[in-house]
Amino acid sequence: MESKVKSNIERVRSAIGGAALRAGRKDSNVRLMAVTKTVDDDRIMEAIEAGIDIIGESYVQEAKRKIEKMGRTIEWHMIGYLQSNKAKYAVKLFDMIHSVGRMDLAVELDRRAAAADLVTKILIEVNTSCEKTKSGVPYTEAMQLVKDVSALNNLSIQGLMTMAPWFDDPEDARPYFASLRELRDRIIDENVNRVEMRELSMGMSGDYEVAVEEGATILRVGRSIFGERPIAK
C-alpha cells in the first residue's frame, strides 16, 4: 500500500496556513513537529524527505536509536515525561526538552548539562487543565517555576508547553491554549532575567488549527501525518 505521509504533511501544512491566515499570523512562524512514537523508521524518513525538520520523541532510548540511524540534520525534541535518572542522556540527545514541569527535574538537567558543558534549551510544561492524569506544573504555580528555573545557568527557557484535554470538538480546547498564551504574555511582562518566551508548544492532531489561531509556534502532530497508531497486543 502506498504511503500517504507526504500528502498528509502537505494537507496539514495547508490547514496550518489557513489557520494562520484567520489569526493574522504568518504560517512561517509555526513549525510542524512529527511525533514518531511507534512509527517505523521508513515512514519517519519519508517525513524528513517531505520537509519535516523537527522530530518529537517520548522515550530516551528510542530517540537514541533513531538519532544514531537518522542523524542530526533535523532537530530532535523530547516531548514525553522525563525521569530525572534519564537527564544525563537527554541533555546530550535533544535539541530541546518540552516536558520540564518540576524543579527537581530542572535541577538534575542543569547539573547534567553543566557536566557536559552544554546549555540545554527547555520549555516549561504547564498543566492548563488541572487534570491529575497530565504532567506539568499547575497553572497557578507556573510563574514561580519559571523564575526558579531561570536561576539555573545551564538551562535556557525558550517558552511554554501544554497538552489540552481531548474533545470531540476542537473548539473546546481553545480556552486551554488561550490561557497558555496569556501566561506567556504575563511572563514577558515580568521581564525575568535569562528567560525567552519564543515558543508555545501546543496543539496536536485533533486541535492544531485552533492552537495556531491561539498563538502556537510548535505543533506536535503524529496521527494526522502517520495515520492511526497500531493497537498494542
Image: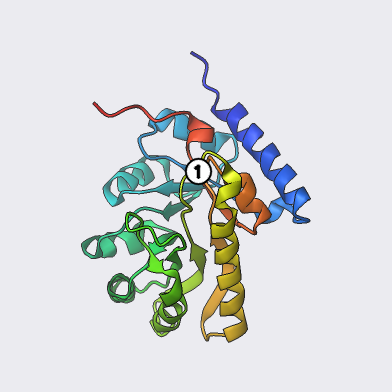
**232 left or right of 36?**
left
**32 left or right of 125?**
right
Up the image or down, 127 lies above or below 220; here it is: below
The location of residue 216, given as percent across then percent down, is 60, 57
Which quadrant of the figure contains the C terminus?
top left
In which image quadrant can residue 118 be found? bottom left
The residue positioned 48% from the left and 28% from the top of the image is 227
Circle 1: residue type: Phe
> What colour-coding does the image apply?
rainbow
In which image quadrant can residue 71 be found? top left
Up the image or down, 151 lies above or below 216; here it is: below
The residue positioned 57% from the left and 49% from the top of the image is 172
The location of residue 195, given as percent across then percent down, is 52, 78
The location of residue 57, given as percent across then percent down, is 39, 47
The residue positioned 40% from the left and 62% from the top of the image is 130
Decide: few, some or many residues near mark 1? Use Cα within 10 Å; few <14, some 14-19, many ≥20.
few
Up the image or down, 113 lies above or below 190; here it is: above
Out of 108 and 168, give the one closest to the viewer.
Answer: 168
**38 left or right of 9?**
left
Residue placed furthest toward the left: 85
Out of 3 and 67, give the one closest to the viewer.
Answer: 3
Up the image or down, 219 lies above or below 177; here it is: above
Out of 63 and 227, give the one closest to the viewer.
Answer: 227
The residue positioned 38% from the left and 82% from the top of the image is 152
The location of residue 136, given as percent across then percent down, is 38, 64
Out of 184 and 91, give the one closest to the viewer.
Answer: 184
What residue is shown with label 1? 167
Query: Total label count?
Result: 1
